[in-house]
Image (cartoon, rainbow, N blue to C red):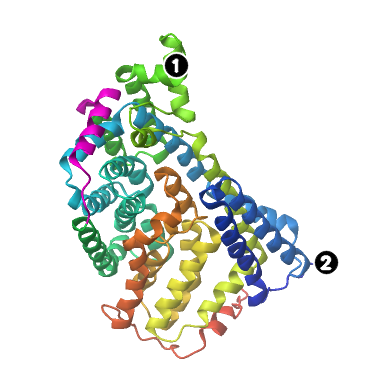
Amino acid sequence: MNKQIVKEPPFLLSLIPVFVLVALLFVAIRTFGADALSGGNQIILLTAAAVCCAIAMFYCKTKWSVIENSISSNIFGVSPAIFILLIIGALSGTWMISGIVPTFIYYGIQIIHPSFYLVSTCIICAIVSVMIGSSWTTIATIGVALLGIGQVQGFSTGWIAGAIISGAYFGDKISPLSDTTILASSITDTPLFTHIRYMMITTIPSMIIALIIFTVAGLSYNAVATDRILLYTTSLKQTFNISAWLLIIPAATFFMIIKKVPAIITLFLSAMMAGIAAVVVQPHLLHEISGHEISGITSQFKGLLMTFYGSTSIETGSAELNNLVSTRGMAGMMDTVWLIICAMAFGGAMTASGMLKSITSAFIHLVRRTVSMVASTVGCGLFLTLTTADQYIAIVLNGNMFKDIYKKRGYESRLLSRTTEDAVTVISPLVPWNTCGMTQSTILGVSTFTYLPYCFFNIISPLMSITIAALGYKIFKIETENEEEDILDELSRPKKVKSV
């Protein structure tokens, strides 16, 4: 049987699908604006994937079955994230209609002073995320409530979302419960708490700078008129049955998370509890959502199911407040689910064709000294985050690619694990077609490009990683015998197997 000969794609040829993707996304976003998520971006991702497949099959001689298996594997890998996303859609609907989020907003706008709202939001999200280890859950729960408080106080959605995401990803990055933290440490063979302690060197300064910016921005903010806040609190009180007892459900949710109950189970149970609370506490709203003329069990049942899966709108007497308490349910997540699947198709095609490997190998050639080593790792991590559209894949590929190089050069594994998190975990929500970027944008209802300039912690982190490397602070190099040999030749040299 003849063995298939697969050609390694050259660097410039491998860049063609990436250029096609970036160019068409730029045109789509300019053309459709925020509506690009409704279909335009998905078609472009599939188009870029098709270009990649064509080059792979005709130039690299890659079989279609190999590409298909790679795409299927990618999609299968994000299936838990898709389920979580759908459940979060149901959770956001039930938490709003049951009165949980309105209760947070009602009490929050009276407790949190506008001058310190942004910095308080960032700190609260950071604390919650450290405790539970999940940026997604933090943003979908307390983040949504804080978003409502900020909107009532008159802050722009970009600033609010930037503070929420900065805090949530601080916790996601350093929490021992975070899956990305565990993944980055394990893939680089670094003890978990060694990895976390070493990340503090870049993470704490990045967070301090972000908090200073949010504090200055808050102190410079012109507070909205008191009568406007009074109008909102009155409207909330008249529309919803505000009760502190509703906060038992968020408390129970966080308890389940701390007890390490699987995320899908936790979020599902939380949505169910909120649904029951809606029937007990807000039956009049379920009747309004159902559209039935006569209130009863049928109208409440229909309204409850619509809250889980569909769009809801409640009349509060204020147009701004109407938008704030409207929900989209599971159906509102479908554009994001579609986009994730298309993004995984592009990432799978790039991997199967060898183009991803060809491009990332170029970063290895830049390795000379400590700064170039860290900068190359950061650059590669950013590139993988852009092209694979998934933070987990990017962490695994980045860690595996540089692990032997760091070892040969005599660098500690904790330097690689820290740099990978600085470049991948915190940047992923800033990429519109990345699973994190799509999810956070959908949950908060704020486009990625709107909140990107205000995610100061996320932007500063990779720059801080390179800065610390340039200063040489706490970066120790272990002397090796083969330090001067060519790393690329050593890595590409086939290993000899001894006969027994």
SS under mark 2: loop
Find the residue positioned furthest to the right: 1
Residue 418 location (% of width, % of height): 35, 68
Disc 1 crowd, CA 10 A, few/some/many (<14, 14-19, 20+) = some
Q: From where the camera sits, is residue 4 visible? A: no
Left/right of residue 257 with respect to residue 404 in the rendered view: left
Q: From where the camera sits, is residue 71 visible? A: yes
Which is closer to the viewer, label 2 or label 1? 1
Q: Amino acid at mark 1?
A: Phe
- Residue 465 magenta: no
Q: Which residue is mark 2?
A: 2
Residue situated in front as seen by the camera: 451 or 345? 451
- Residue 228 magenta: yes
Q: Quadrant of the C terminus?
A: bottom right
Q: Which residues are magenta?
A: 221-245
Q: Amino acid at mark 2?
A: Asn
Residue depicted at x 33% and y 79%: 469
Residue 136 location (% of width, % of height): 38, 47
Q: CA distance from mark 2 to mark 1?
A: 63 Å
Count how many numbered circles sit on residues in the image.
Answer: 2
Say if 166 sits above or below 462 in the image. above
SS under mark 1: helix
Label 2 close to label 1 by CB (< 8 Å): no
Residue 222 location (% of width, % of height): 21, 52
Q: Quadrant of the N terminus?
A: bottom right
Q: Which residue is mark 1?
A: 301
Residue depicted at x 65% and y 62%: 352
Quadrant assignment, res 273: top left
Q: What secondary structure characterizes most of the magenta part?
A: helix
Residue 183 location (% of width, % of height): 41, 58
Left/right of residue 221 with respect to residue 320 in the rendered view: left
